[in-house]
Amino acid sequence: MGPDELFQRAVIARRYYLEGRTRIQIAEEFGISRFKVARMLDEALESGMVEIKIHNPGAIDVDLSTALQRRYGLEHAYAVVCGSDNQDGSADSDNTAERVAAVAKAMAELLQSILRDGDVVGVDCGRTLAHIADHLTTLPQCDVVQLTGMAGAINHNGADLVRRISEVSGGRSWPMYAPLVVSDARTAASLAGTQQIQETFDQHPKVSCAIVSVGAWTEGASQVYGSLTSEEVRHLDAAGVCAETCALLLDSEGNRLAGLDDRRMGIDEATLRAIPTVIAIATGPEKIAATRAVLQSGMVSSLVTDVDIAAAVLD
């Protein structure tokens, strides 16, 4: 291709990409067909004369998010970069609070974009989940249902989050005033039979969108773990527990382990799996293996996480 043709290609590319001319307008200006214009634009891209760069929207890493979505067949996938993350996507050890806030904000924005009037939102408990309400500004009218019992600090439990989300949505709230894990099966059955808790359980099949935590089987990374005695933890360690979500225990490959099934107060596995949209949230490198297990379990359909976890579960 001679210099005149190269120059014409460059001018046509400038008209189209920088000046906003249509292919028909360019064809008329240069006295050529619009099909030749289209071919020259394609050649400009293929040759490197034109380079198109798409910037990530806000705090979302598009490449990692797309890879996550494809690898695990997810409905929604957000890999979130917090403001002080390094350029290579890794997070400094001292920015935990900022990372949690960034991931919680992304979850809130996802909810605000996908919820519709009449949806029923199910809520698990968890420290990162508890920050979602801070970033919710408006929601369609939705009822909000607690999926699991209470554990951890008062401002981290599901009942508080249910209240705060329902205040934004204007819908009815269905709390569950019971511990996440109780001492024995008889106590669990007795609590489940009370009117208030039974009414909440009756709402679980109506949930259209659930937000759940990823718990790693280590101190400080799971509210279930923190609810058990050291002897109970050792027993479940020996059984191969790696992760939990909604107090449903999983091994490292995402297989379900019965463990606490007769002592947990929460949505049952079959009902959780039947919910159309189940969004898991996870932050921090200590939750990498647990997040991979939850994804492999098939119990969640979407994930909001940080870039460290996203990159690791793709390896």
Image (cartoon, helix red, strand yellow):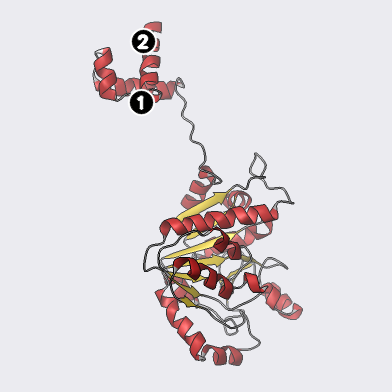
Residue labelled with disc 1: 20
Residue 89 at what x, y percent from top left?
Answer: 63, 43
From where the camera sits, is residue 72 visible?
no
Residue 264 at what x, y percent from top left?
Answer: 59, 81
Disc 2 crowd, CA 10 A, few/some/many (<14, 14-19, 20+):
few
Q: Amino acid at mark 2?
A: Glu
Quadrant in the picture for residue 281: bottom right
Q: Residue furthest top?
A: 3
**Residue 234 sits above or below residue 21 on the image:** below
- Left or right of residue 40: residue 165: right
Question: How far apart are the alpha carbons under marks 1 and 2?
Answer: 21 Å
Quadrant of image for the N terminus: top left
Instruction: Tell me the element at label 2.
Output: helix
Residue labelled with disc 2: 5
From where the camera sits, is residue 158 visible?
yes
Residue 244 at what x, y percent from top left?
Answer: 60, 69
- Left or right of residue 120: residue 37: left
Q: Amino acid at mark 1?
A: Gly
Residue at 65% in and 39% down: 87
**Residue 124 sits above or below residue 313 on the image:** below
